[in-house]
Image: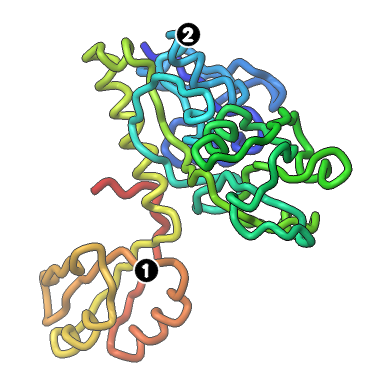
Amino acid sequence: MLSLVLPKGSLEKATLDLFDAADLTVRRASDRDYHASIDDPRIDRVRFLRPQEIPSYLERGLFDVGITGRDWITETEAEVVSLGELRYSKATSNPVRVVLAVPDSAPWQTVSDLPEGIRISTEFPSLTRRFLADHGVKAMAVPSYGATEAKVPDIVDAIVDVTETGSSLRKNGLRILETLLTSYTELVACPPSYADAEKRAAMEDIALLLRGAIQARGNVLLKLNVPAAKLAAVTEMLPAMSSPTITALASGDMNAVETVVAKRGVNTLIPALKAAGAHDILEIPISKIVE
């Protein structure tokens, strides 16, 4: 039913991991293969392409739905329908930023300080030109096809580039002058495909599974048994998405308690629960949380 296009390159592994967690495992002959499949009746064709190209291909109707970044949607100004942010990136769950960076030694402190004719290397020439025009800066935006940081100061004076942690910029002696755009990965659709009720329902199902897999990351399910006399003390220690689920057991004055907690910190929480009177404590991985 749906033709799906996924990002090749830096987002590729993180995207494959997400689809696997969502029970939408992507299968292909090798990691160099641009054609793939997903064993799901809602998806009949899968391709891998550079994220820069994906918004335009969706706008032209070559695919029904795909994953790319808000940065490339903004750069291409493609008309696509967003099905929502998928808060993951190549290294963290944080957004990436498109930033204007200059050498540490440069005197400029704001974008308005940039001199006329400054040379700026970037993979986002359209976004950069629009940003500079909005700030009244007359500059030369030089298209870059990789290794953008390495072009300062010999080839250009500054760069507009994407960063997740800022470590590569610092390593190359650059500092961030301005953030042009904060970008999450997004699930986006071809407008005519989204207008088709059957295809839209399938897209929303896929989005639900992907969001559920992201929501589950970093969380586990705790199940434990607690005597009635200790119940209040134990439940006060338990964080939960709403409140813990408590069920009276068939015999005795015991209660079964279960709740979703953050994986981080569970190493200290479990001994504390045991000391407070809980026992038969189980820690269970979660693959999806659908609210």
Whole-percent x and y of residue 224?
29, 73
- Give the amino acid type for the residue marked by disc 1 in the picture: Leu
Give whichever of 56, 157 is nearer the camera: 157
- Give the amino acid type for the residue marked by disc 2 in the picture: Leu
Residue at 39%, 40% in the rendered image: 85
Residue at 33%, 12% in the rendered image: 193
User: In the picture shown, does residue 3 fall above or below 107?
Assistant: above
Q: How many numbered tags mark residues here? A: 2
User: In the picture shown, does residue 62 fall above or below 241?
Assistant: above
Whole-percent x and y of residue 183?
49, 43
Q: Is residue 20 visible?
A: no
Q: Secondary structure at mark 1?
A: strand
Asked whether, in this view, residue 233 is left or right of residue 42, the answer is left
| Viewer-nearest of discs 1 and 2 | 2
The residue carrying mark 2 is 62
Q: Is residue 271 visible?
A: yes
Image color mode? rainbow
The residue carrying mark 1 is 282
Give whichever of 184, 228 is nearer the camera: 184
Q: Secondary structure at mark 2?
A: loop
